[in-house]
Image (cartoon, helix red, strand yellow):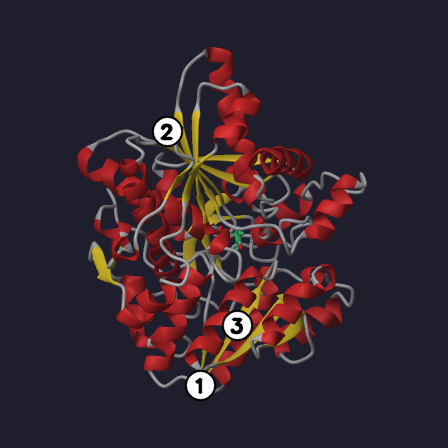
């Protein structure tokens, strides 16, 4: 028989627990601070916008957290997701490296995001919440929460970053099909939105602004909560289902990764695939290299500061210690909308600061070229965000070709690009440009960081 190209797990191998890396951190995370008092935040402070179960997970240091039955029941529709060996890509690259990818594009929304959307919708429903507000960049998170809302009977309101709202009409249609309300942000429906529009009427929006709008709306009514699709500990926790499956599948393949690669916007898909492996390294010392890839136009980990900052533009959220470009920074409108965020997950930031994660950045043209090379070999068109991971994988595989070293590379193909054809159209027509972030704007945004302690 020829060598396998895919590793599939039965439903019975669907993980029963998520993995919480807080249990294994060599040094605990810095506390999250209340934006007013700058004192460590309490569960009561967070209860205005999050359900209790989610707050508990946010603060937990327990290593294993049980995945509720109804969440597993929904997961089973597409999980365990397949692990592929990219044999045709390896051949095309003429590399001795072995390339594996976990494919999260098989979810109904086409990305890894439903892994946490389903869990968050479940906990909200369980606690009697009627409506959830959120923001979305590229549209994947809004789509995923819209889907989860329709499964669990919740109203969903999505503030979509204006540039994506205009670039991606089908994402809006997707959300509305599931009954969600989708509003271009900045909007005139909130104070935060109106304040931005008064100053910048042509604002293309940003995740930071959209978060302000969604949080503002949630804080106004008792039956409404807010959900975030990345960055926070509980979101990264839910995504570990990806890496926990990948561990079993790598074992089926009789292999173990030398490096794990993922793209990073807020950090959740990267954490999802890498944290279970990193946990093993932290507990047993088994070595592994973790590479987080971000766009050169929004270089949070590679050019940002590790400091306390707000998660949003209107400074409504708690202060978290993270790599940041400053909460007032609005990244240029490049096509990987899911990577346009000024901050980075505190857990990813902390582990990068400690040297466990190696950050890297690439520009958009190189990433699209890599994505197309991948698509031609493997038949899957990656999401523009995922192209960043693909670029790093191809680079590493070419290093192996040149040195003759055979490494085992695992990466997260966190979503397909079937809703992103406008981006590919622009690229193929030669109309995409490499955008650079404005260094003076970042300097200004960083100068405006809150002074803490
Ligand atoms: C949202 C999204 C991202 C960025 O978010 P992370 O939390 O860093 O994973 C990346 N890729 C895809 C396909 C997304 O939907």
Residue underneath mark 1: 130
**In the foreground, 305 or 91:** 91
The CB of the residue at mark 2 lies under 8 Å from ligand 1: no
Q: Residue lying furthest top in this view?
A: 403
N-terminal label among 3 and 1 = 1
Whether 382 is drawn above or below 288: the answer is below
Residue underneath mark 3: 146
Residue underneath mark 2: 1
The CB of the residue at mark 3 lies under 8 Å from ligand 1: no
Asked where in the image residue 159 lies, by quadrant, the reply is bottom right
- Residue 178 x %, y %: 56, 75
Which quadrant of the figure contains the C terminus?
bottom left
Whether 288 is drawn above or below 225: the answer is above
Bin the neighbour count of mark 3 within 10 Å (Cα to Cα): few under 14, some 14-19, many 20 and up.
many
Q: Secondary structure at mark 3?
A: helix
- Residue 163 x %, y %: 71, 60
N-terminal label among 3 and 2 = 2
In this view, the mark in front (3 or 2): 2
């Amino acid at each position: 028989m020829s060598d396998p190209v895919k590793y599939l797990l039965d439903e019975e191998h669907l993980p029963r627990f998520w993995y919480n890396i807080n249990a294994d951190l060599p040094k605990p995370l810095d506390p999250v601070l209340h934006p007013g008092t700058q004192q460590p935040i309490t569960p009561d402070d967070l209860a205005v916008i999050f359900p209790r179960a989610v707050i508990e997970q946010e603060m937990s240091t327990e290593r294993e957290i049980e995945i509720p039955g109804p969440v597993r029941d929904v997961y089973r529709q597409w999980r365990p997701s397949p692990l592929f060996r990219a044999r045709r890509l390896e051949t095309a690259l003429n590399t001795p490296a072995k390339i594996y990818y976990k494919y999260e594009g098989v979810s109904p929304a086409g990305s890894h995001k439903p892994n946490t959307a389903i869990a968050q919708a479940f906990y909200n429903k369980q606690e009697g919440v009627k409506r959830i507000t959120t923001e979305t960049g590229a549209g994947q998170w809004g789509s995923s929460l819209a889907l989860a809302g329709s499964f669990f009977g919740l109203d969903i309101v999505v503030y979509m970053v204006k540039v994506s709202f205009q670039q991606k009409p089908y994402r809006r249609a997707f959300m509305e099909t599931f009954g969600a309300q989708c509003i271009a942000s900045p909007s005139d429906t909130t104070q935060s939105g109106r304040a931005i529009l008064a100053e910048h009427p042509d604002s293309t929006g940003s995740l930071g602004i959209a978060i302000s709008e969604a949080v503002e709306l949630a804080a106004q009514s008792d039956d409404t909560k807010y959900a975030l699709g990345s960055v926070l500990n509980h979101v990264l926790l839910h995504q570990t289902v990806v890496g926990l499956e990948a561990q079993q599948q790598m074992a089926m393949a009789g292999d173990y990764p030398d490096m794990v690669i993922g793209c990073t916007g807020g950090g959740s898909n990267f954490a999802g695939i890498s944290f279970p492996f990193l946990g093993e390294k932290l507990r047993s010392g088994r070595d592994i290299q973790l590479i987080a890839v971000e766009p050169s136009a929004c270089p949070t980990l590679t050019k940002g500061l590790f400091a306390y900052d707000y998660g949003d533009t209107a400074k409504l959220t708690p202060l978290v210690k993270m790599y940041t470009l400053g909460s007032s920074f609005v990244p240029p409108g490049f096509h990987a909308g899911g990577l346009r965020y000024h901050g980075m997950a505190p857990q990813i930031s902390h582990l990068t600061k400690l040297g466990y994660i190696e950050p890297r950045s690439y520009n958009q043209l190189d990433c699209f070229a890599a994505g197309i090379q991948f698509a031609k070999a493997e038949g899957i068109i990656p999401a523009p965000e995922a192209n960043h991971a693909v670029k790093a994988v191809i680079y590493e595989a070419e290093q192996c070709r040149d040195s003759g070293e055979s490494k085992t590379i695992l990466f997260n193909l966190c979503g397909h690009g079937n809703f992103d054809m406008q981006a590919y159209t622009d690229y193929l027509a030669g109309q995409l440009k490499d955008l650079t972030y404005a260094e003076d704007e970042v300097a200004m945004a960083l100068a405006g960081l809150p002074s803490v302690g």
